[in-house]
Image: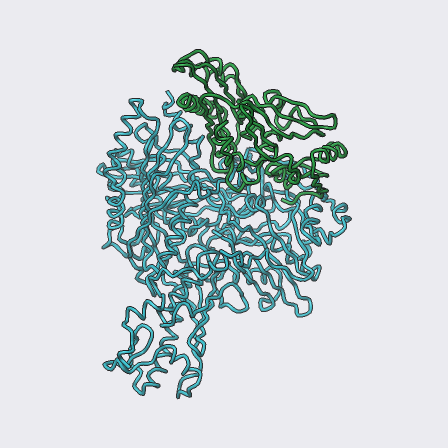
């Protein structure tokens, strides 16, 4: 029998477990157009909802007349705030402890705000009826600037909060002020800055943008009046949380609500929150007794659903003359729009912005964030990042560059001089985090060597001279970034959303023939969970990944979990998966020992089987054990082979990376070309290298878009200037740079398999790399700071202001 | 993004199409590739009661090069313009420009007739047609008439074509000498921030003729005779090019939008014109 057993490595390879570049099992359906998205769903008798939206950014709603709309054949109902008020659903709570209008209640606060919900027999009639709803507005003064919003005489935006000087996160000091959030030691930091050799100060603005998933938001709500059960199919990144919130808001018992997230065409944070469309569809279904579908279009998605960023970060960084950083100070003005609908853990109104000390050993630091209301759409979601980590990373990586200029130092050298050293982990940061593991110097040196950093600097110096001599009009920028992420929210002791602890879960059932199904509390939006979670399990339980089905997104079947965002799936649900797998294995060990007629401790695990210690010819494979669990009466062991694990992570994970961008810039036209983009990621244990590479390509492309042109821009009247894909930059294959990916591996010490998560690192890390490249190109001519996005006219303006146009 | 209700017509001849346009007056719109009209309808910025689709009219297709005369049917797609070897021989500037319009998917459907007739200042072909001194052939209830591209554009979306007329073909004399179409845009699929169409013929070292037209820098394309005249008779030296750029800059009237402020657009217009002149001269 022994000669029949293939070698360990061969058996391990057959499992396609950890480390295998297994092809994505999802792609067969996606590449053949066989995905099942919410808009593919057609239920009998289904109606369609569509919104009347405000053309104004700030106006009083004097009257709404829906008579003509209701008279249009095929129109079933028109809902307004007055209809929702008796149900107390005209407002809804936000994830950030604020409340938000579902339909305009007396006034509108941003362009595109939902004013009335038309329900009709098809979406074409609904669209026609929207035109027929007559709304009389009285325009009010508009505030789009978060600094002007705080002026004494600024218009009162939130009349519902007038006189309430205590918000969800402490005192409000102005009628348009939401909260102040402070971290670190203010006095100590100011004292360090006051006596420092060198202090660099700069305003770093991370502009407002939008996750813009290819699939917009939508749902189908279906109230079954016979059994009292509400089913909502929708684009939800956190189906279980939606169920609980829906129950709390509507009063429908939680067991009577079933939330189903079908295939989701990208989320990137946009699909975490609860939108008026969901509430209105549910109400409309309850009222009409038939299913109601609501699908927003692209303009609605860009104008009204959750934006990202919009942080004005005033920074000061101090150092010794030779470049050792001594202190960091940051005051952020956070533009939250009309309602505070940020999707952050409840105790973190500015997310994890306090990771803004980055990869550096900065002994003293202070952060304050003031949230402010303006006449813009609500949101503030983590667009492919952990909560506000992109803002933090951009801030520190720009401040490092600004400090390097002040010191007259090379920015790569300044970074290396200040990195947290390998032997300092676990590292306690000045702003309160315990970094789990890292080896920044190794990654940095590898990155610099890979791009021939010294050679690039030499070439750049020659280019500057050639430019000055008039031989070229192109400048060369070298954009450096070393980022540290904080993901995997998170430990229940400090991370919750609306009181729901941010653990996650996995439930496994092994079938008699040795295949399995695992269900998780997360939901893939393109990340490839069905592929990678099966790999984690394959390595844990010794069954081939190909024989393991992964299922997510149906609250009636999946165990409770907080969903997928903030790179939390692998750190939290991935850990739950490994832990549940270990429970399976523990039981399998008892069964194997029984079958082999030895003591439990006398068998040991060997890839896909238990073998008798010292007698490798005696073993039971997991397939055999699975079958035995269903057909053998084993004393003291229950039949079947199932396990469930709810995992509360002991800490966050801290992925990191070194990104370098080499960019050519045309000083005359503001055009750019990415000559090289090198991305080294350390996400701990690598589950599927191919998927990691895909994640890096996707995230870096989003980062490229954000840095180089993508924005949600408003004019002074609060009109959205970038409401279509003509003006909102979404790169095509043509614009997308070529990427070189690389890695180091520093496992997380507290995660069961050492994985840290990678989905968001490339968005976090690439934005400062692109932006720093633009800045670096002009460093020789005196540029210190310019704001993103670095589109052509803004780069041209930088060149003009530096006198480069002669 | 759902259009209002409309009647759809698909005539199979120019006469039938013109009859429909005459019958329904300003309630009717002809649709060629639809890349401008359909988004406008979906945004409900264009209210069209009768949509007259020209896809069924085979007479509007085709590209003909006959001696020195090029005739392009209004329904020739951008892709067909690019693919035509005869056209590339006769007027290579068209391929160079068409390759800078949108993306392949759009070019398979988008037509030259729609591009020039819509009067959108962002479209590339109107400026190019002015540069080539093309003639547009219009057919209406009263019959056929010719209008020069240089006389066709009155303001944004306002042209010499009346509501009941159809632009059926475009005719021009194959240009001689060097050519260039230089376009700056933000991304694939975008309209020009600034674009220049330049034709230059040389006699020995001297510029013997020139034609220059600019795109998306005013509410109509800008054919700039003074800029061309600044080049003719010169060796295309720096002073001549400076003078051409100065003349062009005086003739354009760009507006601020998401592509950038006026100063930027004027500057970029100068840069693209210089580059176009240089490339055209090198090919002359």
Work out whether residue A737 or residue B45 is closer to the camera in this orientation and state it. Answer: A737
Q: Residue furthest left?
A: A322
Work out whether residue B127 or residue A738 is closer to the camera in this orientation and state it. Answer: B127
Asked if one can make out residue A704 in the rendered structure from this viewpoint, the answer is yes
Is residue A639 shown left or right of residue A48? left
Give the chain ID for the cyan colour: A
Residue B121: image location, x then y, percent: 57, 28
Give the chain ID for the green colour: B
Is residue A314 shown left or right of residue A292? left
Asked if one can make out residue B194 in the rendered structure from this viewpoint, the answer is no
Residue A647: image location, x then y, percent: 41, 66
Q: Quadrant of residue A751?
A: bottom left
Work out whether residue B77 or residue A123 is closer to the camera in this orientation and state it. Answer: B77
Q: Residue at x 65, y 56 (%)?
A: A88
Work out whether residue B114 or residue A175 is closer to the camera in this orientation and state it. Answer: B114
- Which image quarter is the C terminus of chain A in? top left
Is residue A302 shown left or right of residue A311? right
């Amino acid at each position: 029998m022994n000669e029949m057993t293939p070698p360990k490595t061969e058996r391990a390879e057959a499992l396609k477990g950890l480390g295998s570049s297994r092809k994505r099992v999802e792609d067969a359906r996606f590449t053949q157009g066989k995905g099942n998205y919410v808009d593919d769903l057609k239920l009998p008798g289904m109606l369609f909802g569509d919104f009347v939206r405000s053309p104004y950014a700030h106006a009083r709603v004097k009257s709404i007349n829906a008579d003509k709309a209701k008279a249009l054949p095929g129109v079933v109902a028109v809902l307004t705030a007055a209809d929702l008020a008796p149900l107390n659903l005209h407002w809804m709570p936000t994830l950030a402890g604020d409340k938000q209008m579902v339909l305009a209640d007396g006034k509108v606060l941003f362009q595109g705000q939902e004013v009335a919900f038309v329900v009709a027999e098809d979406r074409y009639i609904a669209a026609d009826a929207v035109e027929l709803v007559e709304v009389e507005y009285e325009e009010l003064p508009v505030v789009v600037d978060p600094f002007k919003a705080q002026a004494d005489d600024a218009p009162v935006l939130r009349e519902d909060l007038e006189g309430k000087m205590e918000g969800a996160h402490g005192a409000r000091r102005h009628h348009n002020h939401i909260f102040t959030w402070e971290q670190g030691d203010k006095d100590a930091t100011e004292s360090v800055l006051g006596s420092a050799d060198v202090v660099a100060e700069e305003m770093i603005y991370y502009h407002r943008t939008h996750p813009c998933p290819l699939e917009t938001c939508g749902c189908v709500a279906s109230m079954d009046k016979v059994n009292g059960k509400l089913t909502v199919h929708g684009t939800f990144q956190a189906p279980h949380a939606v169920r609980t919130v829906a129950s709390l808001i509507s009063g429908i018992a939680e067991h009577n609500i079933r939330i189903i997230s079908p295939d989701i065409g990208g989320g990137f944070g946009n699909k975490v929150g609860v939108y008026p469309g969901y509430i209105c569809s549910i109400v409309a279904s309850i009222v009409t007794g038939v299913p109601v579908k609501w699908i927003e279009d692209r303009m609605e998605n860009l104008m009204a659903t959750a934006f990202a960023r919009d942080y004005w970060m005033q920074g000061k960084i101090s150092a010794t003359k030779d470049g050792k950083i001594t202190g960091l100070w940051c005051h952020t003005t956070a533009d939250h729009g009309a309602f505070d609908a940020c999707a952050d853990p409840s105790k973190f109104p500015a997310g994890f912005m306090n990771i803004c000390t980055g990869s550096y050993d900065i002994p003293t630091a202070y952060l304050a964030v003031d949230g402010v209301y303006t006449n813009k759409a609500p949101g503030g979601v983590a667009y492919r990042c952990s909560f506000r980590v992109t803002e933090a990373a951009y801030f520190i990586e720009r401040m490092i560059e600004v400090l390097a200029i002040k010191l007259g130092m090379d920015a790569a050298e300044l970074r290396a001089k200040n990195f947290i050293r390998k032997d300092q982990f676990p590292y306690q940061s000045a702003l309160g985090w315990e970094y789990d593991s890292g080896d920044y110097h190794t990654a940095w040196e590898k990155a610099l060597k890979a791009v021939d950093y010294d050679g690039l600097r030499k070439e750049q110096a020659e280019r500057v001279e050639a430019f000055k001599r008039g031989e070229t009009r192109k400048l060369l920028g070298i954009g450096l970034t070393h980022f540290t992420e904080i993901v995997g929210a998170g430990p229940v002791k400090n991370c919750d959303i609306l009181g729901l602890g941010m653990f996650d879960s996995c439930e496994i059932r092994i079938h008699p023939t040795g295949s399995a199904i695992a269900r998780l509390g997360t939901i893939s939006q393109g990340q490839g969970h069905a592929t990678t979670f099966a790999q984690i399990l394959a390595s844990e339980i010794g069954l081939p990944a190909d024989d393991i089905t992964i299922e997510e997104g149906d609250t009636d079947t999946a165990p409770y979990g907080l969903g997928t965002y903030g790179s939390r799936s692998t750190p939290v649900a991935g850990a739950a998966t490994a832990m549940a797998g270990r429970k399976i294995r523990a039981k399998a060990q008892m069964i194997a020992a029984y079958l082999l007629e030895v003591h439990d401790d006398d068998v040991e695990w060997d890839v896909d089987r238990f073998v008798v210690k010292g007698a490798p010819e005696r073993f039971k494979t997991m397939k055999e054990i699975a079958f035995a669990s269903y057909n053998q009466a084993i004393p003291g062991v229950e039949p079947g082979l199932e396990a469930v694990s709810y995992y509360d992570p002991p800490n966050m994970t801290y992925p990191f990376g070194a990104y370098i961008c080499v960019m050519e810039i045309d000083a005359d036209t503001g055009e750019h070309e990415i000559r090289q983009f090198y991305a080294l990621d350390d996400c701990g244990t690598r589950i599927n290298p191919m998927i990691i590479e895909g994640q890096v390509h996707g995230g870096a492309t989003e980062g490229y878009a954000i840095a180089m042109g993508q924005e949600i821009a408003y004019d002074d009247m609060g009109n959205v200037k970038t409401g279509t894909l003509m003006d909102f930059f979404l790169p095509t294959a043509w614009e997308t740079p070529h990427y070189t990916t690389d890695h180091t591996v520093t496992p997380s010490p507290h995660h069961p398999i050492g994985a840290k998560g990678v989905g968001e690192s490339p968005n976090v890390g690439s934005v400062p790399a692109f932006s720093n490249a633009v800045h670096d190109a002009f460093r020789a001519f005196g540029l210190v700071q310019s704001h993103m996005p670095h589109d052509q006219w803004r780069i041209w303006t930088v060149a003009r202001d530096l006198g480069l146009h002669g | 993004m759902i259009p209002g209700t409309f009647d759809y017509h698909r005539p199979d001849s120019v006469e039938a199409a013109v009859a429909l346009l005459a019958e329904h007056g300003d309630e009717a719109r002809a649709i060629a590739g639809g890349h401008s009209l359909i988004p406008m309808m979906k945004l409900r910025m264009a209210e069209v009661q009768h949509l007259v689709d020209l896809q069924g009219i085979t007479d509007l297709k085709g590209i003909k090069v006959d001696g020195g005369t090029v005739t392009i049917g209004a329904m020739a797609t951008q892709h067909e313009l690019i693919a035509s070897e005869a056209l590339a021989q006769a007027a290579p500037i068209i391929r160079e420009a068409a390759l800078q319009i949108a993306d392949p998917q759009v070019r398979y459907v988008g037509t030259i007739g729609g591009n020039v007739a819509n009067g959108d200042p962002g479209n590339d072909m109107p400026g190019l047609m002015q540069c080539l001194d093309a003639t547009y052939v219009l057919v209406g209830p009263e019959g056929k008439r010719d209008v020069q591209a240089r006389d066709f554009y009155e303001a944004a979306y306002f042209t010499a074509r009346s509501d009941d007329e159809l632009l059926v073909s475009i005719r021009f004399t194959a240009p001689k000498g060097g050519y260039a179409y230089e376009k700056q845009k933000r991304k694939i699929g975008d309209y020009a921030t600034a674009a220049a169409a330049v034709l230059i013929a040389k006699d020995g070292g001297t510029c013997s003729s020139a034609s220059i037209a600019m795109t998306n820098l005013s509410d109509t394309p800008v054919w700039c005779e003074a800029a061309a005249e600044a080049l003719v008779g010169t060796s295309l030296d720096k002073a001549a090019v400076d003078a051409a750029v100065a003349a062009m800059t005086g003739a354009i009237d760009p507006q601020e939008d998401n592509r950038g402020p006026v100063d930027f657009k004027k500057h970029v217009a100068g840069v693209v014109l210089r580059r176009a002149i240089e490339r055209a001269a090198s090919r002359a």
